[in-house]
Image (cartoon, coloured by chain):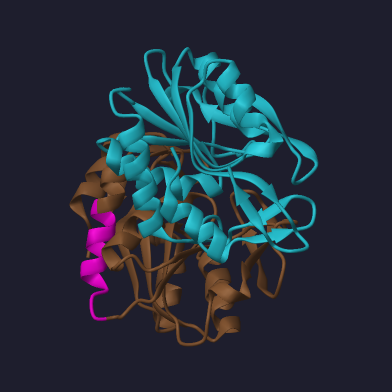
Chain colours: A brown, B cyan
Amino acid sequence: MCMRELEERIARDGVVKAGNVLKVDAFLNHQCDVELFDHMGAEWARLFSGEAITKILTIEASGIGIACVAARHFGGVPVVFAKKAQSINLDGEQYATTIYSYTKQKEYPVIVGARFLNKGDRVLIIDDFLANGCALEGLIELCRQAGAEVAGIGIAIEKVHQGGGDRLRERGFRVESLARIAAMDDETGEIAFA
Amino acid sequence: MCMRELEERIARDGVVKAGNVLKVDAFLNHQCDVELFDHMGAEWARLFSGEAITKILTIEASGIGIACVAARHFGGVPVVFAKKAQSINLDGEQYATTIYSYTKQKEYPVIVGARFLNKGDRVLIIDDFLANGCALEGLIELCRQAGAEVAGIGIAIEKVHQGGGDRLRERGFRVESLARIAAMDDETGEIAFA
């Protein structure tokens, strides 16, 4: 179920760069259009109605703003953002895993305080991008460690041709991406939606 | 002008740790209470009404959720979050400076895309904490490079005893902190508000 407003915005303000990179920093992950985020939240709330979401989980940094604005459409459930590196401010019991970033070409640790993800939680995972799915695998693993159930995955932009979304769907996860990109051409700047 | 709801929440769920550390990760900067963020946004909107804010500037990661929820009370102005490290996804002209983190005991680069901060912008800077003021100095410097005006600074928690807030006020900045902490005791766990 795609969201025309988001696709139109990507077509207008997204920039395709070499290396299969789509820059959406004008409205999604550097400058943030909070009205757009609000509409995205409303759409996820419609799609996941009946899922009785108790918590939204995302990962710093780009997912946080989207998740916090969206949460208001889920009755104001708490948002938890996984942290990407050990901080001296994060102590107590933790769930931890490792995510490989193709963008940065390195592995990094991802941590969430154990108090904030619990058995019985029905978690909606939200993130800005889904490409190969590595970041989501990490967040799913944190939920597994906590005994929390992944009730759904809400994505702003899925790069369908990279296959991560379909691999997650094959494993039984419900993934709802608001814009689905089938192909991009960095020479013409063209973006084809699925 | 303090906000009783936030102070009460700090008194209830904040934890004082050795080294003058106040942990508020249960509601502010790891798990996020978005209803509280919404009330904070309403309070800043009241305090800065008449300032004709055109943009909210914050810094990853903890400021993002607060700023994005608050922005809806400022007519949905764009939120820009400064990034803490050079990313291959951030190209084009940039404003950059360096911030010293006492928490992490190191300097780190802070960058904002030049397109997103402009001459004529009236910027409200929002962040979760104000202690010595180093992070804010960096954000103010980015505004200076852009020729944008800092119309105000909205802070969730000011640690008054560390002096950063008063140094900024002496320089003429309007700093509105919603909770002001005068002293903390990590042995008794006591938090005294200013």
> Does residue B175 show up?
yes
Task: Please name whichever residue, A21 or A135, is drawn nearer the observer in this view of the structure.
Answer: A135
**Above or below for A155 versus B182:** below
Q: Quadrant of residue B98?
A: top right
Question: Up-down: is B146 above or below A116?
Answer: above
**In the image, is residue A137 above or below residue A63?**
below
* Residue A107 on image: x %, y %: 70, 59
User: Is residue A117 located in the magenta-colored stretch of the structure?
Assistant: no
The residue at 67%/73% (across/down) is A94
Q: Main secondary structure of the magenta part?
A: helix
At a point 28% along the width and 59% down the height, the residue shown is: A41
Report the residue at 56% width, 65% height from top. Answer: B13
Using the rendered image of the protein, determine whether residue A158 is visible from the camera's viewpoint.
no
Give the magenta range: A39-50
Question: x%, y% of residue B101?
Answer: 73, 39
The spot of residue A159 in percent (x, y) is 40, 57
| Spot occupied by residue A96 in the image (x, y as percentages of width and height) | 67, 71
Q: Nearer the viewer, residue B159 or A8?
A: B159
Q: How many marks?
A: 0
